[in-house]
Image (tube, rainbow, N blue to C red):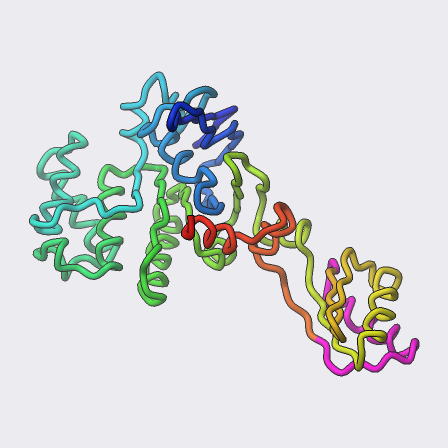
Amino acid sequence: MIHARGLTRRFRIKRESVDAVRGIDLDVGKGQLVAFLGPNGAGKSTTLRMLTTLLPPTSGTATVAGLDIVADPAAVRARIGYVGQKNSAGEYFRVLDELVTQGRCYGMTRTESRRRADELLDLLDLRPLAARKPGTLSGGQRRRLDIAIGLMHRPALLFLDEPSTGLDPQSRANIWAHILRLREEQDTTLFLTTHYLEEADSMAERVVIIDHGRIIADGTAAQLKSDLAGDRITVTVPDPASAARAADLAARAVSASEAVTEDSTVRLRVPRADTALPEYLRVLEAAQIKVCAAETARPTLDDVFLALTGRTLRESDAEGVAA
């Protein structure tokens, strides 16, 4: 569905050239749910805008839904749906009218548009809102309407740019329930950006991480966490001297790739914490090092980003907001 090679976008700002995207290589197959992650300014939205023909690439090639984004942008737009960060519907027309108008813009007859609008009202639980104006809807309701607008012409590929940002937890969960149902019932290929790492971790079957305009990781969430971050073991001992001894034993005892001490606490990174912790505790007991407390933790996608870049996604986002 998506095939991109060397996709680059350069902007000129105050007589200087800035590479927002520096050569994206990406392939997305039919029916996949791909989460595109990265800090503010990493190039996520710029990449989406190029793939959806809203922004021409400076160099590189890409085919989306089997069509070249530069040679045939109109045909690409006819085959894809795009839900941007801002609301799509106007403020003063009824929800049903917005959907029918969208269908008409894609060349559907009035009858076809009305039939498809009725389908989407039911699919996205918008039926009770059909006669209301978008300006009277809640944030979650408006996002469902945005998704419905993006689906009016039955695209096989839907781009979603931060579909749940700014919503309360209940509305976010509701949006995701509808997104997953779309994929299950209509086999829609979904390519989305999100700032919520837990969403990508639990919902997407594939995670692509971008930083400074380049893709730095690509795989399943479980694979990335296992290969790049590892599980965490935290052990507390009586004093700093014991902690130093415990850290020295970690590499030999449980193949820890990282052992850090802080006062009387030892933090390890290991491939499998569930099997490593019992063995480590046996080794410490044999060395007569008393353990006051021990716990394990599975890695997060933020840990993956930290391992790749030396900083977390949340730290990067905070810096972007401060700037």
Horizontal and vertical percent position of residue 190: 40, 43
Residue depicted at x 55% and y 37%: 215
Horizontal and vertical percent position of residue 42: 47, 40
How many marks overall? Answer: 0
Q: Which stretch did the figure color magenta?
A: 270-294
Q: Is residue 279 left or right of residue 315?
A: right
Residue 120: in magenta span: no
> Closest to the observer: 242 or 253?
242
Where residue 88 sits, quadrant-wise, is: top left
> Closest to the observer: 40 or 182?
40
Q: Is residue 160 left or right of residue 255?
A: left
**Residue placed farthest to the top in the image?**
71
Please, is residue 68 above or below residue 141 in the view? above
Please, is residue 26 above or below residue 137 in the view? above
Residue depicted at x 78% and y 62%: 259
Horizontal and vertical percent position of residue 30: 45, 37
Where residue 289 sits, quadrant-wise, is: bottom right
> Closest to the observer: 16 or 271?
16
Where residue 161 sits, quadrant-wise, is: top left
> Closest to the observer: 83 or 108?
83
Please, is residue 278 above or below residue 175 in the view? below
Horizontal and vertical percent position of residue 195: 43, 52
Residue 289: in magenta span: yes
Residue depicted at x 32% and y 19%: 72
Quadrant of image for the N terminus: top left
